[in-house]
Image (spheres, rainbow, N blue to C red):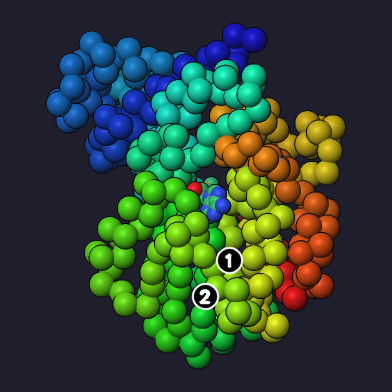
Amino acid sequence: MFSKLEGAVTAGMIHLGDQLGLYTALKEAGQPITTAELAERTNLVERWVREWAHNQAAAKLVSVDEGGRFGLTPEAAVVFATPDHPSYGMGMFHRLPQTMHALEDVRESFRTGVGHDYDSHGPQGAVGIERSFEPWSNANLLPTVLPAVEGVVARLTAGAKVVDIGCGAGSAVLLMAKAFPHSSFHGYDISQYALARAALKLEDSGLHNAAFDDPRVSPLPADQSVDFITTFDCIHDMTHPTDMMKAIRQAIKPDGVWLLVDIKALDSFEENARKNPMASLMYGISVLSCMSSALSEADGEGLGTLGLSEATARRMTEAAGFTRFRKLDVEHSVNAFYEVRP
Ligand SMILES: C[S@@+](CC[C@H](N)C(=O)[O-])C[C@H]1O[C@@H](n2cnc3c(N)ncnc32)[C@H](O)[C@@H]1O
């Protein structure tokens, strides 16, 4: 039991190391340094830095040599301090305080049944999601994922109408909009914090072929006009995924394609618990974030983090009027990728 508490507290220390620039300073030092040097490089007080470094070294996240100098292995430097690397891991730790703050809110949810949407995690919650998903997406979406979906790259190159639902801060939309200037991209999300970040990033990008909206204000087109629809890690978070799948079916062209990316869940609790080493983490995140979001309206379906297995996705998409479903050969530690067609 105390090993779980150790993990939770050390996770908090990882959050601090990220926010205070301690990992970046260790990486930039290029060689092991004392806590006095680390404190000087970060403008922090040595006594506090020393206690933090001792936590990190005791947890074997930061290395320590016989002279009491602390450093990052090349692997640790990637995970802790290289934001543009696909294995960068600070996103979920960025939003750790917001995620844990949900403990205050969800006690009542256990009584009422009603959860809280992503905006209950505040603006930093949206930044944490952005930092969690962007590094892998930046490295893999264009070279690996899109080519795996039959015919999509040619279609996007020629000029296609594209919709990304649950777009978060718009990373995937902006990446694709830049790569395919003849296509138009529309991102939809219900998080006002995420939409605000997406709008800022759009302005910075100077792109004119992308837009972002809240689907409750500007609904998805219902005229079978969209060539390519993407949903990255969001269907299981939605209060009404069944309705959303029907809306996707109404939006998509008869020869259009939907790239459905969602958590690699297995069909039963027993299988998840036995085969997925991250199962307990995922069921916990579900209570604090995913299922809470999926129950944030009284009649929410509440799929939750491990609620959309391949079999469930197949059944639900079929019920929404899709006839073709293919699992793509894309390697990802947490996600599964499906090509779904009318
Ligand atoms: C885990 S985040 C993924 C964000 C983004 N796709 C990414 O990969 O960074 C899930 C997102 O789904 C959004 N969401 C939840 N319900 C939604 C709905 N009904 N319509 C659109 N977006 C929704 C949330 O606000 C949140 O931004």
In this orientation, does residue 143 appear?
no
Vertically, is 129 above or below 95?
below
Amino acid at dot 1: Thr
Q: Residue at x 61, y 48 (%)?
A: 238
Q: Residue at x 47, y 37 (%)?
A: 92
Q: Residue at x 72, y 69 (%)?
A: 340
Res 47 → quadrant: top left
Q: Which mark is residue 162?
A: 2
Vertically, is 218 above or below 53?
below
Res 71 → quadrant: top left
Q: Is residue 3 left or right of residue 35?
A: right
Label 2 CA crowd tier, 10 Å (few <14, some 14–19, many 20+): many
Of labels 2 and 1, earlier in sequence is 2
Could you say where residue 281 lies in the image, as x and y percent from the top left?
Answer: 63, 30
Could you say where residue 77 lies in the image, as x and y percent from the top left?
Answer: 39, 40
Q: Is residue 316 left or right of residue 212?
A: right
